[in-house]
Image (tube, rainbow, N blue to C red):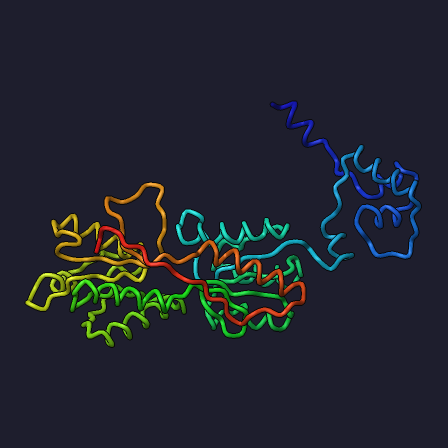
């Protein structure tokens, strides 16, 4: 093992000058052939072949920075979230980033992920240094990155939450919220407990507002609760009172996300409340779990992986100088489970 460490540590990187010397060519000729440099240097077919053979024999790899200076492209895109740590163990980010990676693979580029929402300075340095060709962002309208993107004319696309100054790719959150209300009305519910969120996210606001608007039009009474926000205790004493007391008690719970709805289901089951016979529960996301819970959640399936992939496609078009739509809204799907 120690010998292996010495061997690896002793290896020196092969430079363009090394290859040029081996092939008996000038460094400018080697740069034209191996890095795609734009130069007035003319290279004969024989010299080009010698350079390519020397590079392969010596294990030369082109310098990415040098190539980007000659082509104007780094073949790398960035991903940034202004509100959260991009944790792949989170089901939402797992699907979203998986879609971005699939799109980048289709396009043939690399992806640089900015993994924390607390290091804006590092991201600003990355953008201003032109280490990436474009950026996919999950931010709100007030994020500090926006003015710099405009100043540097960095191609950028917003995903999940619409940003009016950027081309945006979202799920149809409003239709999802309306479907939740219509489904519960169809089942005969009259009073619903809405588990909302204070996240400053346009997608969350859209689905909650649409649910409340549709519920009002359908004659559904809605009681709103923020219990459980930021992973706190779900179904506090006031929520339980709404669900258990009075002739007009709430007979259904609507979660702004699958996570909130699942936590409600688990708490109800622990309390001995039958789901959906006593209380029905509806979520929003449609995640598929590796270890499924002891129920099949009724939910709105949002195509988060496809949102990520489409955002990458739109960014590609933007970098290529093509016109792109201001908003791309992908359809959601109602999934009937065992909780309603």
In the picture, which quadrant includes the C terminus? bottom left
Residue drawn at (32%, 41%), measured in percent from left and top? 291
Q: Where is residue 34 in the image (x, y as percent from the top left)?
A: 81, 46
Residue drawn at (75%, 38%), measured in percent from left and top? 13
Residue drawn at (92%, 40%), measured in percent from left and top? 46
In the picture, which quadrant includes the N terminus? top right
List the single residue furthest toward the front: 186
Which of the 4 image quarters holds residue 182?
A: bottom left
When the figure is inspected, residue 279 is found, relative to residue 60, above or below; the finding is below
Q: Position of residue 138 (x, y in %)?
A: 48, 62
> 54 or 214: which is nearer to us?
214
Which of the 4 image quarters holds residue 245?
A: bottom left
Which of the 4 image quarters holds residue 208?
A: bottom left
When the figure is inspected, residue 229 is found, relative to residue 221, above or below; the finding is above
> 298 or 229: which is nearer to us?
298
Is residue 329 left or right of 255 when viewed as pictured? right
Q: Where is residue 2 in the image (x, y as percent from the top left)?
A: 62, 24
């Amino acid at each position: 093992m120690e010998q292996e460490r010495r061997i690896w540590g002793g290896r020196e990187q092969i430079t363009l000058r090394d290859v040029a010397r081996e092939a008996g060519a000038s460094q400018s000729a080697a740069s034209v052939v191996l890095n795609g440099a734009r130069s007035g240097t003319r290279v004969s077919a024989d010299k080009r072949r010698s350079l390519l053979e020397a590079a392969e024999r010596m294990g030369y790899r082109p310098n990415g920075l040098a190539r980007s200076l000659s082509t104007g492209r780094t073949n790398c895109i960035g991903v940034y979230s202004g509100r959260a740590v991009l944790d792949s163990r989170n089901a939402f980010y797992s699907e979203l980033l998986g879609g971005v990676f699939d799109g980048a693979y289709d396009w043939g580029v690399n992806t640089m992920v900015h993994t924390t929402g607390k290091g804006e300075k590092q991201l600003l340095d990355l953008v201003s240094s032109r280490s990436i060709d474009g950026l996919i962002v999950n931010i709100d309208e007030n994020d500090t990155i926006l003015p710099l993107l405009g100043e540097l004319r960095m191609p950028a696309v917003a995903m999940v939450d619409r940003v009016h100054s950027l081309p945006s790719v979202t799920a149809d959150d409003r239709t999802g919220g309306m479907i939740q209300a219509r489904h519960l009305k169809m089942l005969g519910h009259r009073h619903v407990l809405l588990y909302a969120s204070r996240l400053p996210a346009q997608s969350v606001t859209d689905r909650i507002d649409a649910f409340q608007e549709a519920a009002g039009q359908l004659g559904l009474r809605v009681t709103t609760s923020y219990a459980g926000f930021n992973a706190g205790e779900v179904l506090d004493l006031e929520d339980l009172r709404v669900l258990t007391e009075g002739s007009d008690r709430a007979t259904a719970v609507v979660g702004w996300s699958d996570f909130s709805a699942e936590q409600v289901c688990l708490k109800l089951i622990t309390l001995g409340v039958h789901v959906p016979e006593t209380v029905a529960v509806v979520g929003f996301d449609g995640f598929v779990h590796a270890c499924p819970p002891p129920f099949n959640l009724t939910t709105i399936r949002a195509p988060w992986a496809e949102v990520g992939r489409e955002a990458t496609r739109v960014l590609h078009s933007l970098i290529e100088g093509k016109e792109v739509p201001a908003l791309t809204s992908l359809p959601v799907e109602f999934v009937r489970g065992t909780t309603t």
